[in-house]
């Protein structure tokens, strides 16, 4: 099988695995960071927003963690009806867990014995933060964004993920108004595990598609 990618863009760790380097990560004070701080201080000064409201919003963002996505995946593994709903209507299915994904369009990509899906955002770092938290640094790196669409199998290998050549690798490019969530295959040996027992097996990287879930 050959690799495929849907490469349209409107606006554009796993422990023990070697991740792509991050040559474009920079912690220096940039123009945009300076502008963000200036606008924030101005809004507070004009009583349009308070520092407490900003703090609460940051706390809400920090509460978005990959475990939220893992619970959704585990539910789909043990409940076939929920899985069908998750694929057909992700917004409605995810709302059952109390998550509001907002106006953006979410597509759930199911991995199968014939297809392995992996997600990228080639121009920035579009990512389903409502259910996976903040994107990892390697996801935002220029190397990952450029290489995974050209040589996905090689990049996956760097994460310790070997995809057999009888499985197609599909690369999906997130956009400004569309996000993807990978639904990994349930691992062999987990048949007797409960939903709660499955959750810790499901890491963030598997829901991006760069790793697979194992017991």
Image: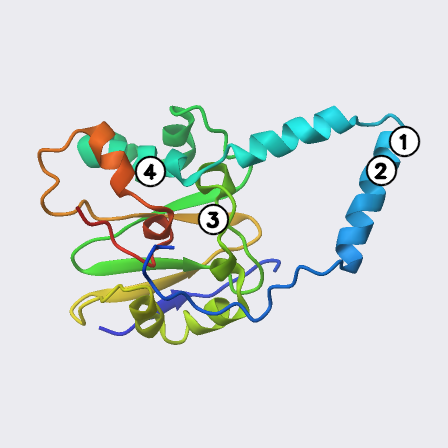
Image quarter where the N terminus lies is bottom left
Q: Secondary structure at mark 1?
A: helix
**Residue at which label 3 appears:** 179
- Measured as percent of width and height from the top left, residue 183 is found at 29, 46
Q: Can residue 102 be seen by looking at this rendering?
A: no
Please identify, in this view, whether the residue under mark 2 or under mark 4 is nearer the observer: 2
**For residue 117, above or below residue 178:** below
**Residue at which label 4 appears:** 70
Tags 1 and 2 touching, CB below 8 Å: yes
Q: Residues under labels 4 and 1: Cα distance?
A: 41 Å
Q: Residues under labels 2 and 4: Cα distance?
A: 37 Å
Please identify, in this view, whether the residue under mark 3 or under mark 4 is nearer the observer: 4
Q: Earlier in the sequence, mark 3 or mark 4?
A: 4
92 left or right of 112 in image: right
Q: Earlier in the sequence, mark 3 or mark 1?
A: 1
**Residue at which label 1 appears:** 45
**Residue occupying the point 22% across, 36% down:** 198
Q: Residues under labels 1 and 2: Cα distance?
A: 6 Å
Crowd around label 1: few <14 · some 14–19 · many ≥20 (10 Å): few
56 left or right of 88 in image: right
Tags 3 and 4 touching, CB below 8 Å: no
Q: Residues under labels 3 and 1: Cα distance?
A: 36 Å
**Number of numbered discs on residues:** 4
173 left or right of 114 in image: right
**For residue 84, above or below residue 157:** above
Q: Earlier in the sequence, mark 2 or mark 4?
A: 2
């Amino acid at each position: 099988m050959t690799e495929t990618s849907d490469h349209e863009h409107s606006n554009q760790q796993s422990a023990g695995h070697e991740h792509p380097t991050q040559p474009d990560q920079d912690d220096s004070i940039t123009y945009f960071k300076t502008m963000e701080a200036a606008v924030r201080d101005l809004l507070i000064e004009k009583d349009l927003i308070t520092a407490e409201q900003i703090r609460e919003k940051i706390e809400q963002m920090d509460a978005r963690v990959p475990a939220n996505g893992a619970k959704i995946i585990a539910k789909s593994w043990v409940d076939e009806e929920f899985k069908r709903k998750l694929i057909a209507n992700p917004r409605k299915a995810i709302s059952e867990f109390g998550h509001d994904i907002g106006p953006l369009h979410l597509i759930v990509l199911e991995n199968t014995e014939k297809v392995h899906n992996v997600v990228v955002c080639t121009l920035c770092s579009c990512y389903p933060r409502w259910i996976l938290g903040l994107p990892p640094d390697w996801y935002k790196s220029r190397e990952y964004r450029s290489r995974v669409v050209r040589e996905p199998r090689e990049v996956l290998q760097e994460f310790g993920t070997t995809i057999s050549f009888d499985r197609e690798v599909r690369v999906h490019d997130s956009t400004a108004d569309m996000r993807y969530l990978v639904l990994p295959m349930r691992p062999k040996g987990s048949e007797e595990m409960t939903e709660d027992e499955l959750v810790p097996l499901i890491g963030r990287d598997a829901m991006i598609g760069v790793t697979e879930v194992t017991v």
